Image: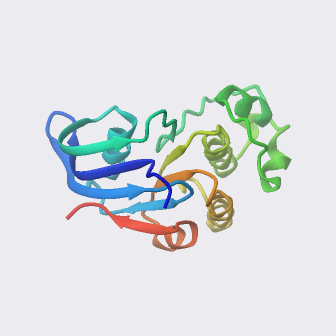
Amino acid sequence: MAEPLLQARELVAGYDQPVVGPVSFIVAPGEVVGLRGANGSGKSTLLRAIAGTARVFDGRLARRPGLTVAWLAQQPVRLHEMPFSGRDYLRYAGARDTPPQRLAGWLDRRMDAMSGGQFQLLAAWSVLGCGADVVMLDEPTNNLDPEGEAMLAEILGNQRGRRAVLLVSHEGAFLEAACSRVLEVGP
């Protein structure tokens, strides 16, 4: 087995006080791992601990040396006016990989003319396409209808074996379709 990208042992994390943990897990290269749990169980806080923006109170969080991480927040920033194309957006976001064919039709459209679901899928690709070792997606199904969820699950399925993906979602069917395994977070 390849060296783990991330390894948490009895990790307890939060901000002023603990929010999540103790939790233990290993993330290997190429895995798509879903995080499921009730609202307030600490799923997003766990992602923030991995990103280094939440405090680790106890336990251990080990990252492979040189690990690169990309993160899509629950509510990606979308300005009322975004007078540039989807292609420009991906370039500004640092996406280097060619987007999936299913997104190609939006690349020349203005960002502010896209639906919420189209914007959400391009935002997800902006981090998936950046070449990071680990991509973290926090509630990537926000604004997606069932067709959009299926499209995102297909895109994530194509990431298996390429880079590790950690994603938070309340959508059980989506997690089962998109992930190689699902971890329960919280009590």
Examine the rendering and report whether any part of residue 81 can be seen: no
Left or right: residue 99 versus residue 16 is right
Which residue is found at the position 64% from the left and 53% from the top? 162
Name the image quarter holding the C terminus.
bottom left
In this rendering, position of residue 85 left or right of residue 31: right
Residue 185 versus residue 89: which sits nearer the camera?
Answer: 185
Camera sees residue 82: yes
Q: Residue at x 47, y 60 (%)?
A: 33
161 up-or-down from 14: above or below: below
Q: How many marks?
A: 0
Coordinates of residue 65 in the picture (x, y in percent)? 44, 35
Tell whether 148 sits left or right of 48. Answer: right
At 78% from the left edge and 52% from the top edge, which residue is drawn?
A: 100
In percent of width and height, residue 27 lies at 43, 55
| Colouring mode (rainbow / by chain / secondary structure / one colour) | rainbow
> In this view of the protein, which residue sits in the foreground, 138 or 24?
24
For the residue pair 137 and 121, the one nearer the viewer reads as: 137
- x then y, percent, for residue 176: 51, 73
Quarter of the rendering containing residue 146: bottom right
- Indicate whether 147 appears above or below 6: below
Q: Is residue 108 above or below residue 11?
A: above
Residue 130 location, x and y as percent? 65, 37
Residue 176 lies left or right of residue 160; in this view the side is left
